[in-house]
Amino acid sequence: MAQKKSKQRKAVFALGNEAVVEGALLAGCSFYAGYPITPSSEIMEVMAARLPRSEDGVFIQMEDEIASMGAIIGASLAGRKAMTATSGPGFSLMQENLGFACMTEVPLVVVNVMRGGPSTGLPTSPAQGDVQQARWGTHGDHPVIVLSASDVRECLEMTITAFNFAEKYRTPVILLLDEITAHTREKIELPEPGELEIVGRSYPTVPPEWYKPYEDTMRGVSPMPPIGSGYRHHVTGLTHDVLGFPTQRPDEVKAIMERLFRKIDQFYPDIMLVEEYMTEDADIGVVAYGSVARSAELAIDMAREQGYKAGLIKLKTLFPFPKPFVNRLAARCSRIVVPEMNMGQMSREVKRVAARTTSIRTVNRIDGQIITPTQICKAITQG
Amino acid sequence: MKTAQELNRFEIRLSGTGGQGIITLGRILGGGLALGMGYHVTQTQSYGPEARGGASRSDLVVSSRRISYPKTESIDLLVALSQEACYAYYRFIKPGGVLLVDSGLVRQTPSNVFLGLPFTDLTVRKLKVPQAMNVVVLGALTWLLPFAEARVMKQALRDSLPPKLHELNLKAFQLGYSEARKAFDPHEAWTPKPDDDDGDERIVL
């Protein structure tokens, strides 16, 4: 049965960036606004070619990344699944409106293909320097979901997951790729529409006059009608009451802020995605994400050949940080190696969780080159 | 006719100058090997911010199994289309690996053990379109690589280029293929023959 299906599927030799577009279109994305920037430009290029040809697809090239975020927030409020893609310099510009989207609970997907920074940095080289920015870049205390992908197949899957999470939890979702993942070509089979789970938005079931746009629910996620459908919906970045109008009453402020966190917090098991490789009997752990996770996988094979029992946790969700998985690995391992293309943004999280249980060793590289399997293998074997 | 063979991380690095079409070459070669021959292939690229000039390279890993690390660390085949690229990446060739250069552009090789064809000169002389040089290289690689079939590569070429370019590029492919056939024995690179001793250009590492 499964084989039969795979025969019908179309195989393509695609870039990670192209797979992002395929994933977005499968997830139902019908609006893209952006400003091109290496190494994310192919996402925009392919979107520009594909969206206008799909049914009511809209593509706009904006004047900058600030406006891009504004446009996709508007499109999402009007009921569309919307996304944009950028790299570090553009992502910095997006932070303000990203906070607006957190506050007003607008589902959207932002893909950030990380390149060397700070500032314009290394346009064509990989880095993983935007990890903490993705989590804390916009001001104010806010929950956010940050995902990552390490190969082309995952680019497609995680884009769909990003859209699903965005709609399910009414929140912006950031998908962090790096230049290597985005610019790697691999063969992938495109799933048929309907083959993968696609989550839609929840719409109000009450008549318009009863509708409260920010009313608390069991899931903490309020139903969201498209603007213009007859439901009155006031949208403001100011802290608002259940009707969407500004408030300073401590009880109302507390309620909305706690709901913003609760709607993500209570679904941690659903949101925290990892992939484990040879961890069953591991006594040396590796925690990696993005393209570095692929180096780490080969490093595990190399270390195993030399007789070291190493195992890998590949983080697919970066935030909320998959604490239980790292905890379990830490309990089993004498040390954990965290390789990443920055000076230790994720190892900080690993240390926070596991420093009291085990020793943590970081492998950092910030010269615009990928961390090689040999480098990671050395850290595994030489402790 | 070439048969599919078991490969474990066969690593190819295509390198040269920006504007030579290195990444397009990698894309077509990778596409043919992945979609036509059914191998697991990863193709990555590395280039400078310039549109032309600067260093450019594309790494391919071809394997019968799933590929973890998509870049190359020990190269089976290095294609160097500029002197700088030849110097920069020569040391990454693994023992028994092969160096293929554009003998018109690479004047000095770090070793006298290499394969060479004047790709750019050939293209300019025979086709009058220097931009087709990368496809001439593709033709030569198809002859050299024991697991690449000409039929499949031509199809990959057609699939990844707009129709108006097909004729010229198939001609370029054929040029590279037949020049390589004239110059090198079949898969000489990976099946060395002890008696073969006709010129230092064709000695195997």
Image (cartoon, rainbow, N blue to C red):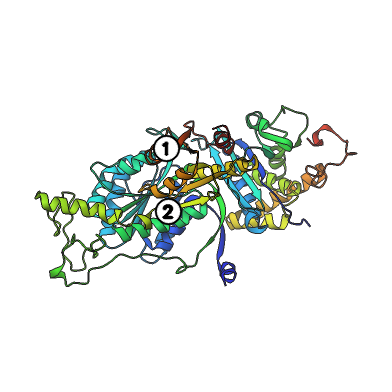
Look at the picture and state if A85 lies above or below A375. Answer: below
> Sequence-wise, which precedes: disc 2 or disc 1?
2
Neighbor class of circle 1 (other Cα within 10 Å; few <14, some 14-19, many 20+) is many
Q: Is residue A320 above or below residue A88?
A: below
Residue wearing tag 1: A347
The residue wearing badge 2 is: A273
Measure the C-alpha gap from mark 2 to mark 1.
17 Å
Residue B126 screen position, x and y as percent: 72, 44
Disc 1 marks a residue whose amino acid type is Ser
Front residue of B50 and B110? B110
Residue farthest right in this picture: B195
The residue positioned 41% from the left and 40% from the top of the image is: A354
What chain does badge 2 belong to? A
Left or right: B149 as drawn, with respect to A355: right
Q: Quadrant of the C terminus of chain A?
A: top right
Residue nearest the viewer, comparing A33 with A314:
A314
Residue under the point 47% across and 68% down? A195
On the question of residue B117 being in view, the answer is no
Residue type (three-letter) at the residue carrying disc 2: Leu
Residue A344: x percent and y percent?
Answer: 42, 34
